[in-house]
Image (cartoon, rainbow, N blue to C red):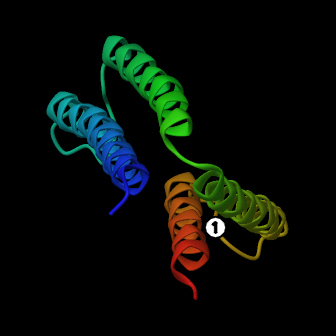
Amino acid sequence: MRPESRDGLAAAKARKQRLQLIIAGLMGAGAVLGFFSAMFEVDGGGFMEGIPAGWAIVASVILLGALGYGGWRYNLATDELDRRDNQWACAVALNVYIGGYASWYIWWRGGLVPEPQHQTIFVATMAVMLLAYGYKKLRP
C-alpha cells in the first residue's frame, strides 16, 4: 500500500472522529437544556410551561451558542458532498415548514382546524429534514 492512501485513510478517520465529537457536543448541549428545563418547570406544567425568565434567557444563549459554534465547526469538518446533502435537506424542510405552517394558519383563520401547534410544526420540520438528509445520503 502506498503512503498516500494511508494518509488519506488517516485523514478520513480523523474527520469522522471530529464530526462525532461535534455531534456529541451538540447532543450534550441539548441534554443540558432539556434536563434543566424539565427541572425548572412548575408542578403539573406541560412541556416548557412555567420556566423562570432567567433560565429562558440562559437556555436561549446556550442554544444559540451551540448552534452557531457547533454549526461552524461542523461546516469546517465536513466535505463538499456532505454540505450539499445538508443544504438540500434544509431546503426541503424549509419548504415543508413554509407550506405546512401557511396552510395550517389559513385553515385556522377560516375556522377549519384548531390554532397551529408550533411544537408539532417544529418537530415535523426536523423530522422532514432528517428524512431528506437520510434519503440524499443513503440512496444508491
Q: Which residue is mark 1?
A: 114
Q: Amino acid at mark 1?
A: Pro
The spot of residue 102 in percent (x, y) is 81, 61
Q: Nearer the viewer, residue 29 or 22?
A: 22
Q: Residue at x 67, y 56 (%)?
A: 90
The spot of residue 109 in percent (x, y) is 82, 61
User: Which residue is most to the top?
Assistant: 54
**Quarter in which the C terminus is drawn:** bottom right
So how many labels did they put on this image?
1
Relative to 114, is 39 above or below? above
Does 63 sit left or right of 6 as displayed? Answer: right
Q: Nearer the viewer, residue 72 or 106?
A: 72
SS assignment at label 1: loop
User: Which residue is most to the bottom?
Assistant: 140
Q: Nearer the viewer, residue 59 or 108?
A: 59
Label 1: few (<14), some (14–19) or many (≥20) C-alpha neighbours in 10 Å: few
Q: Residue at x 69, y 73 (%)?
A: 113
The spot of residue 64 in percent (x, y) is 49, 24
Does 136 sit left or right of 42 as displayed? Answer: right
